[in-house]
Image: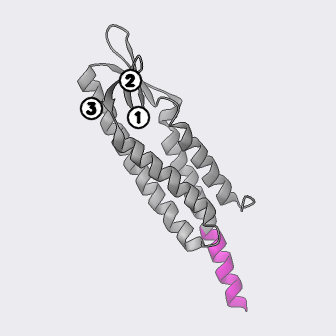
Amino acid sequence: MIQRIQTLFLLISTAILSLLYFFPLTEFSDSSNQIFNFNVFGIYIDNEEIISTIPLIILLSIVVLLSLISIFAYRNRPLQMRLSVFNILVLVGFIGMFAFYIFNSTERINANIHYTIFSVMPVISILLIYLAHRAIKKDEELVRSADRIR
């Protein structure tokens, strides 16, 4: 149901996270000004993979899939709330894994980090999923209060 605000929050979150498949999260530059692109598929220089980041791909795919499932589970609000909490936990794991790869890679390739706007997208997505969770909870409380009146 698109008219519910939580569906819009989840849809925007899914769209934001889907952008991470196409754009680099950060860029590294070494002392010779060589640019290394870091996206969820790995660290690349001139389309040649240096470091593979398969766990990031898996976590991001899980998060996008959970968001889509949560959008289409609008008739089951308790399930939607549980999915949103689990989605936030997986996103926190994604951010932790992302930070691990960044700091491990900077030591390994001896380069400086240049963050892009897409580095902040998982945090924005966490906020959107939290807002969706609050809206779902309000809907559930409203339905329960209407059941008590009958």
* Residue carrying label 3: 104
Q: Quadrant of the N terminus?
A: bottom right
**Circle 2 SS class:** strand
For marks 1 and 3, the one nearer the N-term is 1
Q: Quadrant of residue 80?
A: bottom right
Q: Label 1 amino acid?
A: Phe
For discs 2 and 3, the disc positioned in front in the rendered view: 2
Q: Quadrant of residue 49?
A: top left
Q: Assess whether residue 72 is covered by the magenta stretch.
A: no
Local crowd size for mark 2, using a 10 Å CA cut-off: few (<14), some (14–19), many (≥20):
some
Q: Which mark is residue 41?
A: 1
Q: Is residue 45 above or below residue 91?
A: above
Q: Which mark is residue 44?
A: 2
Tell me where the magenta segment starts and ends, as one range: 137-150
Marks 2 and 1 close (CB-CB < 8 Å): yes
| 101 lies left or right of 137 | left
**Circle 1 SS class:** loop
What's the magenta bit mostly, secondary-structure-wise? helix
